[in-house]
Image (spheres, rainbow, N blue to C red):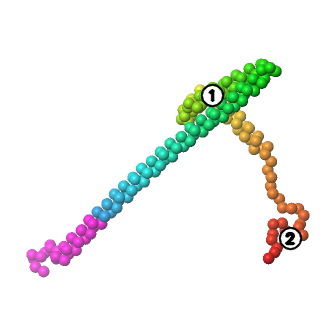
Amino acid sequence: MSNQDFGREPASHRERDGLGQRTARAANDTFSTASDMAGDAAGKAKQAASDTVATMTEQIKQLLDRQVGSGADVVGHFAGAAKRAAQELDSEAPQLAGIVRTAADRMDGYAHDLRDQSVEQLTRAASNFTRRQPAMMFGLAALAGFFAMRTLKSTPTTVASPPIQPSPYGRAGEFHGS
């Protein structure tokens, strides 16, 4: 090795280093491209999921709005039946007929109001009522809980038990044949 070569690397080392750098750059570019593609795919998946959720939410709102309309129809039918009952009561108990008629008119009014409202409007109205009348809502919740517990306690629990006397064919439920 001469003094001129001191500090220089042989050509084979430079070629290997250049090849290594090109390989590293290519690997880095490939990784970057794959990372970008994965990010794009994740973004598209998030957008698709968001669109699906929005569509499902809208369909659920429409279904609930239809259910509110159906509920309003039921209340309206019930009010009509109460009005007919009030007409029949007019001759025998006019005061009771007046009370039933007033209740039927209110139910009919509620049914009419329900038909014109969406689920969001009803939820907002219920929330506002709860803020204005928290004690009443607490009382209604307690009453509902009381009735639920009474209903659950009053239902008998039945447990299937095996027969007390043995069967001449072996224990109940066993198969002894071919």
**Going 88% across and 67% down the picture, which residue do you hit?**
167
Identify the residue at horizontal 84%, vertical 61% (top origin): 162
Asked whether 11 falls inside the magenta stretch, the response is: yes
Q: Tell me which numbered mark, 1 or 2, is placed earlier along the sequence.
A: 1
Q: Is residue 52 left or right of residue 6?
A: right
Image coords of residue 76 (percent x, y):
65, 31
Q: Percent x, y for residue 98?
A: 74, 20
Q: Which mark is residue 170?
A: 2
Rendered view: 22 above or below 95: below
10 Å crowding of disc 1: few (<14), some (14-19), many (20+): some
According to the picture, the residue beneath numbered tag 1 turns out to be: 110
Q: Is residue 178 left or right of residue 140?
A: right
CB-based contact (under 8 Å), mark 1 and mark 2: no
Give the image location of residue 29, x and y in percent. 28, 63
Quadrant occupied by the C terminus: bottom right
Say what amino acid the circle numbered 1 marks: Tyr
Residue 117 visible to the viewer: yes
The residue range painted magenta reads 1-27
Quadrant of the rendered image containing residue 144: top right
Magenta-colored stretch includes residue 5:
yes
Q: Amino acid at mark 2?
A: Gly
Callout 2: SS: loop
